[in-house]
Image: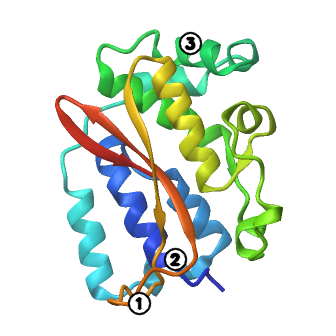
């Protein structure tokens, strides 16, 4: 079965995807949790997704291809990787996209550790460790994106908060701690998930 908070996962992924393109993480989650596939979504959820998909998106094919072709030698440390990823970028938005695309392709989400309910099973979120082990939960993604972004000269901050359950009620958040990033581009802040 899908995790209890799957709707939150999809909703927050859409925030970053509106800036940085379609969410690969959503595809990965759908593979692990088939209930996330379109046939299991309500009409309202389908309409929200369709509205999101109709937003104009910059074309990132060249940046994506470059990021995904990163050689192992460029991936040895945060500074080297950041320098490699942003080399062809024409602006900060393309820098952010290159970093986002690389992270979403190369770093795996440790779902079993998260859903175990035992925080001691969560992988080390230090960006150096995440880069080396290629496995993390949300705080590792947030830390690595922040470290790469700052190394590339971007204005990135980590945001800590709580995930709510899938009912989106007015009740206080659960104990599901969560982390994501905010990045300032063209004078506006965007969330990256």
Q: How packed is label 2: few (under 14 Cα within 10 Å), some, or many (20 or more)? A: some
Residue that label 1 marks: 167
Q: Alpha-carbon distance for marks 2 and 3? A: 34 Å
Compared across the picture, whether 93 is left or right of 56 comes to: right
Q: Alpha-carbon distance for marks 3 and 1? A: 42 Å
Residue that label 2 marks: 6
Tag on residue 57? none
Q: Alpha-carbon distance for marks 2 and 1? A: 10 Å
Looking at the rendering, which quadrant does residue 190 occupy?
top left
Look at 26% across and 84% down and name the residue there: 44
Where's residue 167, x and y in %?
41, 90
Looking at the rendering, which quadrant does residue 84 occupy?
top right
Above-or-below relation of 67 to 25 = above
Look at 70% across and 19% down and name the residue there: 77
Q: How is the image coloured?
A: rainbow
Above-or-below relation of 127 to 56 = above
Residue that label 3 marks: 84
Nearer the viewer's eye, disc 2 or disc 1?
1
Where's residue 31, x and y in %?
64, 67
Above-or-below relation of 58 to 33 = above
């Amino acid at each position: 079965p899908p995790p209890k908070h799957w709707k939150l996962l999809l909703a927050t992924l859409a925030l970053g995807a509106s800036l940085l393109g379609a969410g690969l993480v959503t595809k990965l989650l759908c593979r692990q949790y088939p209930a996330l596939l379109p046939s299991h979504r309500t009409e309202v959820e389908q309409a929200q997704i369709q509205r999101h998909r109709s937003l104009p998106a910059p074309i990132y094919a060249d940046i994506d291809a470059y990021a995904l072709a990163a050689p192992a030698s460029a991936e040895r440390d945060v500074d080297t990787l950041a320098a490699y990823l942003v080399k062809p970028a024409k602006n900060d938005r393309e820098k952010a996209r290159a970093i986002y695309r690389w992270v979403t392709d190369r770093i795996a989400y440790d779902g079993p550790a998260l859903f175990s309910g035992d925080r001691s099973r969560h992988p080390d979120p230090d960006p150096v460790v995440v880069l080396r082990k290629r496995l993390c939960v949300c705080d590792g993604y947030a830390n690595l994106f922040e470290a790469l972004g700052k190394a590339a000269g971007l204005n990135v901050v980590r945001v800590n908060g709580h995930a709510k359950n899938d009912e989106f009620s007015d009740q206080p958040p659960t104990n599901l701690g969560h982390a994501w990033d905010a990045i300032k581009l063209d004078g506006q802040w965007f969330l990256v998930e």
